[in-house]
Amino acid sequence: MDKWKTKEIDDAKAFKGKRTKGSGNLWYSKGDISSKIFLIESKTTERNSFRVSQKLWKKIWEEAVRTQKIPLLSIRLLNNNMDMIVLEQRDFLELIGGGEI
C-alpha cells in the first residue's frame, strides 16, 4: 500500500474521522480526512523535514472554514518515524480549555 494512503488511514482512525473521497481533489469534498471537529490534510515525506508555507496553510484553512471545522495538518516524517500535528495557536488553546496547562 502507498505510504500516503497508510497515513490517511492511520489519521482517520486516530481522529475518529473518515477519509475524503478522492483524497480531497473534488470541488465539493476537500481535505484528506474529515472528523467531527477537524478537516485534516495528511502529508508524508521521506525527507528529514517538511516545509509549511503560507500558501499551503491558507489552502488548508480556507477549506476548513468552508466546512466549519478546525484546520489541521498531519505530517509523517518517515525517516524519523515521527508523526506531527500543525494547527493554529488559538485553536490549540481553545481545545485545551483556554490555555491553562
Image (tube, grey):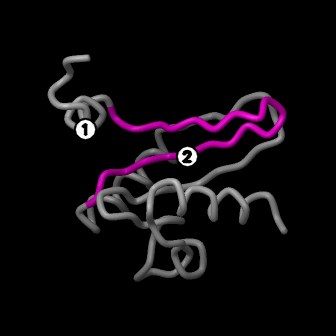
Q: Which quadrant of the structure image shows residue 91?
A: top left
Label 1 CA crowd tier, 10 Å (few <14, some 14–19, many 20+): few
**Residue plotted at (37% across, 62% down):** 63
Label 2 CA crowd tier, 10 Å (few <14, some 14–19, many 20+): some
Q: Earlier in the sequence, mark 2 or mark 1?
A: 2
Number of numbered discs on residues: 2
**Residue plotted at (83% across, 41% down):** 46
Q: Is residue 82 above or below residue 61?
A: above
**Residue plotted at (44% across, 78% down):** 29
Q: Which quadrant of the structure image shows residue 6?
A: bottom right
**Residue plotted at (15% across, 27% down):** 98
- Residue 82: x and y in percent read 69, 33
For mark 2, what is the residue?
74
Identify the magenta region.
69-88
Q: Which mark is residue 62?
A: none
For mark 1, what is the residue?
95
The local secondary structure at tag 2 comes to strand
